[in-house]
Amino acid sequence: MKKLLTLLSVLALISLEGRSPNFIVIFCDDLGYGDLGCFGNPTIKTPHLDRMASQGQKWTQFYVADPVCTPSRAALLTGRYPIRNGMTSAARAVLFPDSSGGLPASEVTIAEVLKQKSYATAAVGKWHLGHLQQHLPMEQGFDSYYGIPYSNDMDFVKGGPNYRQGADDPNFYPDIRNYNVPLLENAKVVERPADQNTITRRSTLRAVDYIKKNKDKPFFLYLAHSMPHIPLFVSEEFRGKSLRGLYGDVLEEIDWGVGEILKTIKGEGIEKDTIVVFTTDNGPWLAFKTHGGSAGPLRAGKGTTFEGGQRVPTIFWGPSRVKPGTVSEMGSTLDLLPTFAALAGAKTPADRKMDGYDLSPVLSGEGKSPRDKFFYWARAKLHAVRSGPWKLHILQREPINYGKLAPMEGPELYHLEADISEAYDVASSHPEIVARLLKMLAEHEADTEDSLPDQLAARIK
């Protein structure tokens, strides 16, 4: 009976307005769990995101599959842990301008899955899954691309000012000429250095234009903002407006962009046909002080497998398709591919191990999340596991210098529902839970050992 109800709820969502839903993923970079008004920030004004959360679902225990850029993005688009799709490495955390690799062509992305149902597809913003032509979005199921191919601090011009020194001042403003980052239209460089002062605004307007042009057919739009990753830049209209300083200015412009997208969806009359997801690739970059974000009550940030590194603020919005409320069950960006596939009536890849779950019953209000466990990976190493409320760490990284492992005397156990900040290690009091979770870790690691050896050769280099 439960399976029948779930099937009926999915069919009902598909049949609304007689068409498959549009999907828009708005993906930020280095946004912290505590950086939005609806997630508790007292000084950054995010009225559009707050309204989006009140009208949709706010997920409070939603995870990314890796605490840094490249592997996190690969996991979202493929529904697979980066250890399986090859986009992780012990030597290099992410791809760089001198990297020759990228997301393997044999990987299947959300865009390619939705192509089964003749979706129009577009990627706007930061890609960071390979900058060479054979690795760009058009080779992974996207019809078009407009954005920067890697992080906005790369291609740094030697001799420029040290951003870490400037970060002591919350209003320090960098110079775009110190970052020779290219802006691409499909595979062609159209601007270099990219004018990052207006990059958020231009990405938003490109997304708005895309929605208007494709309103009469199902579409998938992946809008990956390059900020609030440092260096921070913002349009003149928003500069100096936030009590939080430049970081707040940047987020308030991103919030404006969300408002423009939602306004366009409503104005074009496709709000009942559209699901919008807002989230981010990992937690805040704490090394950059006030130019980095806040993880709120969570421990640590970007680069670590503590909650502050991988639990991210997430909102699902879709009138008539998403039942409003707060969801305190587990979810992950790994789950977007199977969820979108289910709602579109498409098939997920059957020839490889997938790590995502279909969340559509939760979106419709007809069921609970099927995700009851999550594995924390960083730099191709398994660090921790969560099962229900329990989380066991076997490896940890330094909160600021996350390239370095932190010393541990033994496995550490935390009860995340009672101890959201991972402050109280209770391993000695629950040896039976430690043993169970160690077994889960061993089984998962064994399950990934034989993952597509040809793809593992394409790891970040």
Image: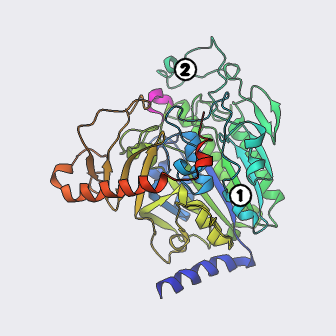
Pick whichever, 396 or 202, lies toward us.
396
- For the stretch drawn in magenta, the main secondary structure is helix
In the displayed structure, 220 sits above or below 169; it is below
Residue bearing the label numbered 1: 111
The residue under the point 63% across, 11% down is 159
Quadrant location of the C terminus in the rendered image: top right
Residue 436 position by quadrant = bottom left
Does the CB distance between marks 2 and 1 fall below 8 Å?
A: no
In depth, the one of 156 and 436 nearer the eye is 436
Q: Is residue 169 visible?
A: yes
Q: Across the whole image, how many numbered discs are drawn on residues?
A: 2
Residue type highlighted by circle 1: Ala
Residue 243 horizontal/vertical position (percent): 50, 34
- Does the magenta run of residues contain 288? yes
Q: Position of residue 21 (x, y in %)?
A: 69, 69
Q: Say which of 130 and 457 sits in front.
A: 457
Front disc: 2 or 1: 1
Disc on the earlier residue, 2 or 1: 1
Q: Are there few (<14), some (14-19), or many (20+) residues within 10 Å of tag 2? A: some
Residue farthest toward the left in the current orientation of the protein: 429
CA distance separating discs 2 and 1: 36 Å
SS at mark 2 in the image: helix
Reading the image, the residue beneath label 2 is: 163
In the picture provided, is 279 more to the left or to the right than 207?
A: left
Residue at coordinates 72% horizontally, 34% vertically from top-left? 198
Location of residue 456 with respect to 328 vertically, above or below: above
Q: Residue 223: x, y in percent?
A: 68, 49
Residue furthest toward the top? 159
Region of the chain picked out in magenta, as a range: 285-291
